[in-house]
Structure formats: C-alpha cells, structure tokens
Image (spheres, helix red, strand yellow):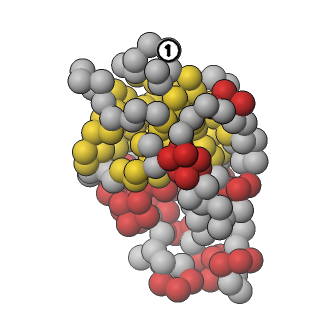
Amino acid sequence: MTLRPRQVRVPAALAGLAAAWALAPSPAAAHPHIWVETKTEIVWDDAGRVAALAHAWRFDEANSASMVLGLDVNGDGRYTTDELAEMAELNATSLGDFGYFTFLKADGTDHAFAAPRDYRLAHDGTNLTLHFTLPLESPAEPDTALVLEVYDPEFFISFRMADGDDAVVLAGAPGGCAIDVARATEVRLDQFVNLSEAFFDAITATESLGVEIVNRALVACP
C-alpha cells in the first residue's frame, strides 16, 4: 500500500492515486488529489436514537476512471456492482484507518462507529459512487444538538457536501428537527442561537483546521 508523508496510509482502493502526494514538502503545503461529493442520511432507530449514518460518496471523473481500470471483467463497457464488489469492500474496510473521515458529536460528546455495512460501488458511466452505512457503536440520544462533520484533516481528499436540500437528510427523526448544512466556510448559526454551551463546544472542536475544508451539518431537535 502506498504511504502518505509521515507514514499515513491511503485507503486501499485509492492507493494507486497517491504517488503524487510524496512530492508535497509538508502537510501544510498539501492540496487535494481526490475530490468527493457527499450525501448522508442520518438514521434514527425506533427508540428515538441516532443509530447510523448512510453515506453516498461520488468520486470525481478522473479518479473514477483510474479506479475502474481493468475491472470490466466481461468487456461490455459497463461496470456492475458485482464487478466492483471487491473494490467496494477494500474502500469500506480500509476507511476505518481514517475514522471514515466522519466525525459525529451529540451534545458535545464524540461517537465512534462500528464496522461499515451495506457497502457497494455504483458506476453511472462517468463517476463512481461509494455507498456504505456506518452504525454507531452506541446509539446517540441528543438532548440539544447533533453535529456531523465530513472532511480529511490532511486535505489529500477534498470532500464537499452536494448541492441541494438532500446533502444531509434525516430518516426517522422526531418531528420538528431543524437542520443546517455548512459547506466550507458557510457557517450559519442563526437557527441555533438558543442552544447550550455543549453545542458550541462541538462546533469549535476543529478550530485548529482551516474551516474551508470542513463540511458540517447542524441538527437540533425539540
């Protein structure tokens, strides 16, 4: 597996894209080599707890083309879920080394993830999309607010939440929940001015990073 500077590994299926990273003089000079557009469904269980995140990550066209080289087994010009199954497994399982580039806090408390499930890759003729579900190790019961962040702290991968209202959606959430998505520096807190101190502790957790690389969804429920 190709290594990043300071021996940081790249997800297995993306390893072939990482060679240029060795040319970067330092993490501070890093710039993205992979671009990913994300959509996420935040899933509540029947007990009213946040139980899982269902991600759909769409890779840029150039990297998608590199990733599927040699995978058209039957030569029909299309890439089926079966042909992409091994790569999907490599992606989903190796992402654990990076915390799945996903950070979740409920009322200021971090929540870890169990092993991913329901992973698959889909190819639309141009772009690859990785679908996978991240169950929480312990379901979250936020009294005040939930903060979801998706980003690569080293900025090797540039994540951006998709445009539109479906970038982050709630499944099975209590009625009356409010959600606000902040792409890059677009932090808007006007809907959440009455929230507790724990909420604001959560959103400042990444203040040492350039906020231009952090995608954030803020969810508040009554």
- 112 with respect to 197 (left or right): left
Question: Height in image: 61 above or below 43?
Answer: below
Question: Height in image: 101 above or below 5?
Answer: above
Rendering coords of residue 117 (x, y %): 27, 42
Q: Pick whichever, 130 or 111, lies toward us.
A: 111
Q: Pick whichever, 171 or 50, lies toward us.
A: 50
Q: Amino acid at mark 1?
A: Gly
- 161 with respect to 46 (left or right): right
Residue 70 visible in image:
no
Q: What residue did someone put label 1 on?
A: 176
| Residue at left offset 59%, top offset 47% | 200
Residue 19 visible in image:
yes
- 168 with respect to 74 (left or right): right
Rendering coords of residue 137 (x, y %): 25, 48
Rendering coords of residue 160 (x, y %): 65, 45
| Residue at left offset 69%, top offset 36% | 189
| Residue at left offset 41%, top offset 60% | 99
Question: Height in image: 192 above or below 17?
Answer: above
